[in-house]
Amino acid sequence: MNDDPNEKTVSSTWDRPFVPPESCPQKADVVIIGGGIVGVSTAWFLAKQGVDVVLCEKGHIAGEQSSRNWGWIRIQGRDRRELPMMIESMNIWRGLEVEIGEDVGFNRGGCLYMARNEKQLRKYADWITTARSFGLDTQIIEGKELDQHVSGASSQWLGAMYTASDSRAEPHKATPAIGRAAERSGATLLTSCAVRGIETEGGRLSAVVTEHGSIKTSTALCAAGAWTSMLCRSLGISVPQLQVRGTVARTSPADVILNGNVYDDRIGLRRRQDGGYTIAHGSVLDHFITPSTFRFAFKFLPALVKEMGALRISIGRPFFDELGAPSTWALDEESPFERTRVLNPQPNPRVLKRFCKSFNEVYPQLAGTRIVESWAGMVETTPDVVPVMCEHETIPGFHIATGLSGHGFGIGPGAGKALAAMLTGNDVGIDMKPFRLSRFFDGSPIRPESTI
Ligand SMILES: Cc1cc2nc3c(=O)[nH]c(=O)nc-3n(C[C@H](O)[C@H](O)[C@H](O)COP(=O)(O)OP(=O)(O)OC[C@H]3O[C@@H](n4cnc5c(N)ncnc54)[C@H](O)[C@@H]3O)c2cc1C
């Protein structure tokens, strides 16, 4: 692994040469596929227990979603099924920098969902019942109280849902830092090392096949983010998963008008450790129609209806790219994962222009602040916008962790802890039934509670 802890830009996480590993271990207790926050957190928790774990990442650690996100560590507004894991995750985040001895930009700055009118405020007030049942500090604030959290806010908004304990961190620092902690605890992290598939013996997982050789193992975790559905399909496993593109930017250092995260339907804003802000559109996501859209359309219908206002749907090259991609491949030949080492979508210039305009209108006190970097990321999601985390019943030993949607950075360390327990047969301490893949096939109702 070759991650510079002092790197300054977000794109430096992925915009650098690929250096293949010098060698590939021949065996391991556990092999993890994917070096995003879920993969490295699981590797860290496993290594701390003395498990011999090897993580294979086709590109760079945190090259995809895990460095490109907004950096919100948010409990408020989540789906109830995710809350126990998220509460555990927040506890891990709070002690993370001390435990790993590295800076990840963690700050307990709070989170606000702003409401312009009574209807929006009532919707947020509904979630307070959920918050109370989980003992959370979420509350509704109104009028001048808003100004204590965002200067000048009461002139823009009626009220807000506010959680003081919600937090933020720097995505481009956090996942590589957890990766280094995993290595210090004994994990092996291989970058530029794509996994092509698996081998089985007597129906059980027996090896993970990488571009640099096979690793004999009885346990694997596929934490491949946006690539999970494709990899699993090649193994005969259907994982309903679709992707949306999110466009993000960061500003130069500017006046402190808030310390945490603020959302309204025009703009999402987070204070950055470097004194600037990470900004994005509050409610626009691009979905490119692909053959998967049709394959999974029925299952995604409830989520599509819920997100209809936010989605900008188009058809173009991604449709033909996916149509032309193989669904299976020989394990001794180059796979699609080596052909795209880093999924690096271009930011949508129209969305960028719109949220920069909103930034100036909604936050006139920051007028003149420059945009210094922009990027995009593909968010992957499941039909009920809740993750899949389970062992697959037809291939004992093969586990899947995917579909963390637009909330996976915050829950990542908690997911890693739960998955490490699951992989070693220990008590997870959390009900994992809501995360089983089979819920999409056994007739269970598909009910998205939160947005992507
Ligand atoms: C624009 C945007 C904004 C977001 N904002 C937030 C936010 O504010 N808060 C929040 O909590 N979440 C947010 N998210 C969501 C969050 O980033 C993701 O849920 C989370 O990072 C997912 O982590 P992961 O480890 O599952 O996947 P990823 O980070 O995508 O990692 C998967 C890795 O697997 C690798 N891989 C794939 N296939 C193979 C293979 N065959 N062999 C080897 N390696 C492979 C990939 O290269 C990739 O590095 C946002 C996401 C985006 C894109």
Image: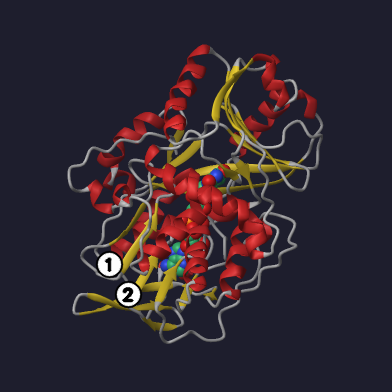
In the depicted structure, whether residue 231 falls above or below residue 133:
below
Question: Residue drawn at (35%, 49%), measured in percent from left and top?
Answer: 241
Of labels 2 and 1, earlier in sequence is 2
For badge 2, the amino acid type reads: Ile
Residue at x-position 58% and y-position 67%: 179
The residue located at (23%, 37%) in the rendering is 445
332 horizontally vs 73: left or right: left
Q: Which residue is mark 1?
A: 235
Say which element carries label 2. strand
Along the viewing direction, whichever of 308 and 340 lies nearer the viewer:
308
Q: Is residue 325 visible?
A: no
Q: Residue at x 52, y 12 (%)?
A: 118
| Quadrant holding the N terminus | bottom right
Q: Label 2, label 1: how many angstroms apart (C-alpha)?
A: 8 Å
The 10 Å Cα crowd at callout 2, few under 14, some 14 to 19, many 20 or more, is many
Whether residue 34 can be seen here? yes
Relative height, residue 148 to residue 79 (above, below): above
Is residue 321 shown above or below 450? below
Relative horizontal placement of residue 279, taking residue 393 as reference (left or right): right
**Residue 263: percent from left, percent from top:** 59, 30
* Residue density around tag 1, few if under 14, some if 14–19, many if 20 or more, within 10 Å: some
* Labelled disc at residue 198: 2
Q: Position of residue 313 (x, y in %)?
A: 43, 36
**Placement of the C terminus among the 4 image quadrants:** top left
Q: Is residue 227 left or right of residue 191?
A: left
